[in-house]
Amino acid sequence: ARARRAPPAMMGRKAAKVAKTKGREDAKRSKLYGKYGKLLVNAVKKGGGSDPVANAMLRDVIKQAQAASVPRDLIERNLKKAESKDQADFVDVTYEAYGAGGCGMVISASTDNTNRANEQVQTAVKKAGGKMAESGSVLFNFKRAGVLVLADEGADAEDDDLVMTVLEAGGEDVLPGAPADDDGEGGSAPRVTCEAEDFASVRDALVDAGVELDLSESGLEYMPLADVEVGDDDAAINDAIIERLLDCDDVDAVACNMA
């Protein structure tokens, strides 16, 4: 039998989709590695040196990095970087912005150069169609919380055993994941929420109970207290703002109350 070929246009669309997906995954991985690089440097500087045996703060960050599949050589490289006298401390900075359709955004950054971070964030927001907000004018619409993402996208957020395990571990709720679109993209797994200060203990209790977590996606987040419904045009603007912000090296996360 003769081999059948897909039409060239189909092959082109498929290749473009694969390339786009790969590019998104590469960018996500790069952001993750950058986040843990900064956490490692801070842990060394604030926790008392690069020996994890003597530095409990560093020990916990290394544990998180390993669970998130951060390469060993990258961990070691950042530990050496932290010991350099030329490496400045990373400071956490929070920015607030208005998106389209009445949406607000909270931008979490960690930087060793606040002037650079300020310029990058302001430029990204303005160029994508947003507006910087005064401190406190957006933040009151969000709550700082711990979020632990399940490894299984198909997990049932209403499963009685799962809910009971979460509550016994000190968690507050299990939020359902988002379904994938027609192309199989955009889906997300259920998330366990908890008080920010309980994140580490809830994480460890769930792992000990056998719950598989995606620790690369888990952490402390600003969660909206209520969602804002917007039209397609406004949603596209907000997505563009978030994408530009996440392209900034100093930005670790962007929370938005868009439904």
Image: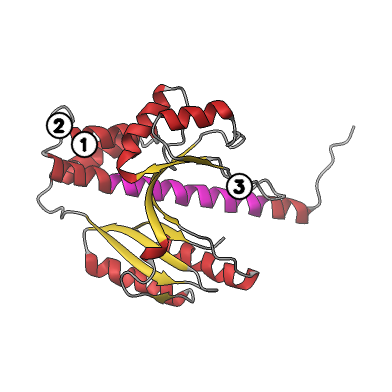
Place residue 208 in its image quadrant. top left
Q: In terms of secondary structure, where does tag 3 sit?
A: loop
Between circles 3 and 1, the one closer to the viewer is 3
Place residue 218 in its image quadrant. top left
What kind of residue is marked 1? Leu
Q: Looking at this view, is 126 or 163 the one in front?
A: 163
Please tell me whether residue 256 belongs to the stretch shown in magenta. no
Range of residues picked out in magenta:
15-37
Earlier in the chain: of badge 2 and badge 1, it is 2
Q: Which residue is painted at 63% across and 70% down in the image?
A: 231
What kind of residue is marked 3? Ala
| Residue that lies at the very extreme toward the top in this rendered image | 209
Q: Decide if residue 66 is in sight here.
A: no
Q: Which residue is mark 3?
A: 178
Q: Residues within 10 Å of mark 1 (few under 14, many from 20)?
A: many
Q: Position of residue 237 (x, y in %)?
A: 55, 71
**Looking at the image, do the residues carrying marks 2 and 1 touch, with CB atoms under 8 Å apart?**
yes
Q: Which residue is painted at 67% across and 45% down in the image?
A: 184
| Quadrant holding the C terminus | bottom right
Earlier in the chain: of badge 3 and badge 2, it is 2
Q: Which residue is painted at 23% across and 70% down in the image?
A: 115
**Looking at the image, do the residues carrying marks 3 and 2 touch, with CB atoms under 8 Å apart?**
no
Q: In terms of secondary structure, where does tag 1 sit?
A: helix
Q: Which residue is mark 1?
A: 58
Q: Looking at this view, is 172 or 14 the one in front?
A: 172
**Looking at the image, do the residues carrying marks 3 and 1 touch, with CB atoms under 8 Å apart?**
no
Q: Position of residue 68 (x, y in %)?
A: 40, 36
Earlier in the chain: of badge 3 and badge 1, it is 1
Q: Which residue is mark 2?
A: 51
